[in-house]
Amino acid sequence: MHGVRAWVLAVGLLCCVFWAARVRALSPEPSDLGSRAEQPPPSTSLDSAATRETAPPGYQQAAELGFQEYERGNYEEARARFLQAHRLWPNARVLRALGHCEFELEHYVAAVEFLQQTLSSSVRPLNDTQRRETEQLLLRAQSHVARCTVLTVPREATVLIDGVEATRDVAGAVLLAAGPHAVEAHAPGYLLGQREVTIEGGVDRVVQIALEPEPERGAAAAPVPLRKKWWLWTSVAVVGAAGLATGLALGLRDPGEAEVYGGSTNMVIPVGYPDGVGP
């Protein structure tokens, strides 16, 4: 009987060990979480005594408060705290946290810019795991934006996108989020040029705007061709009709009834009698 109990206990213990190992094997390690946006970024708190001595006063507190707000899902507040820490001490770790905040807020252009700065920063650079995760998140953010190259004539024209002056790179490109945008260009001496463009994530666009010169001030108006002066021809027709009617009236009138006014007395002399003598 005791042997059977021992055998049962041994089998039960082996089963417990087996299932515990099985569950552990299937559970992801923290590093396997990759760049899933729902996971908070690694804490930006200072992780060594040497770092604490290097960081300026207020940095650690701002960074830790930012991380706490991020964990609560308060991304606007977290971004404000991380920006405060960034102003005190710009480095790759806090830039990475800012990139995560902008991604969660769906500010994909800002997310791309922060994550690119993260990968190029040499101050508190990322470790290999952090770099891989940041590169993955950068790819996700880039799928929501595209480069829009705006070519203008004249080339020095100022470009506004959605009413805000755009900062273009040397190739004339600007990074835009997916969706509709209003593109305007203006330059002294030219009329305003406008275009409506819809950006598709991951698909670069080229927009060309050729501005038209403004009309010269004080320039004489172009002469109107004679055939287009309708008012002139209308006047001629009216005068001609009136003259024709007068001629017909005089031609049909009896000569004996015609009268002539003359002399200082303005005497009326009938024309129908010889020598102008009346009856």
Image (spheres, rainbow, N blue to C red):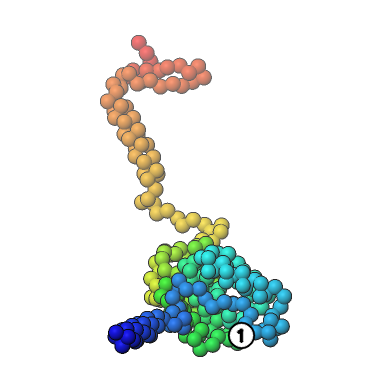
Relative to residue 238, is residue 28 depicted above or below?
Answer: below
User: Farthest residue in the front direction?
Assistant: 1
* Front one among 147 and 18: 18
* Front one among 176 and 127: 127
Relative to 221, is 272 on the left or the right? left
Residue type highlighted by circle 1: Arg
Mark yes or no: residue 245 visible. Answer: yes
Q: Residue at x 66, y 75 (%)?
A: 60
Within 10 Å of disc 1 (Cα), the crowding (few <14, some 14-19, many 20+) is few
Mark yes or no: residue 155 visible. Answer: no
User: Farthest residue in the top direction?
Assistant: 279
Q: How many marks overall? A: 1
* Front one among 211 and 28: 28
**Quadrant location of the C terminus in the rendered image:** top left
Relative to residue 6, is residue 177 depicted above or below?
Answer: above
Q: Residue at x 36, y 51 (%)?
A: 227
Estimate the x, y position of residue 199 in percent, counting from the top left: 40, 69
* Front one among 134 and 42: 42
**Quadrant location of the N terminus in the rendered image:** bottom left
Q: Residue at x 39, y 40 (%)?
A: 235
Estimate the x, y position of residue 184 in percent, counting from the top left: 49, 65
Relative to 127, is 61 on the left or the right? right
Estimate the x, y position of residue 92 in percent, counting from the top left: 58, 82
Give the residue pinned by disc 1: 124
Q: Residue at x 44, y 79 (%)?
A: 33
Q: Residue 49: name its quadrant.
A: bottom right
Relative to residue 180, is residue 143 depicted above or below?
Answer: below
| Secondary structure state at the residue bearing disc 1 | loop
Estimate the x, y position of residue 115 in percent, counting from the top left: 52, 78
Q: Residue 81: name its quadrant.
A: bottom right
User: Farthest residue in the left direction?
Assistant: 252
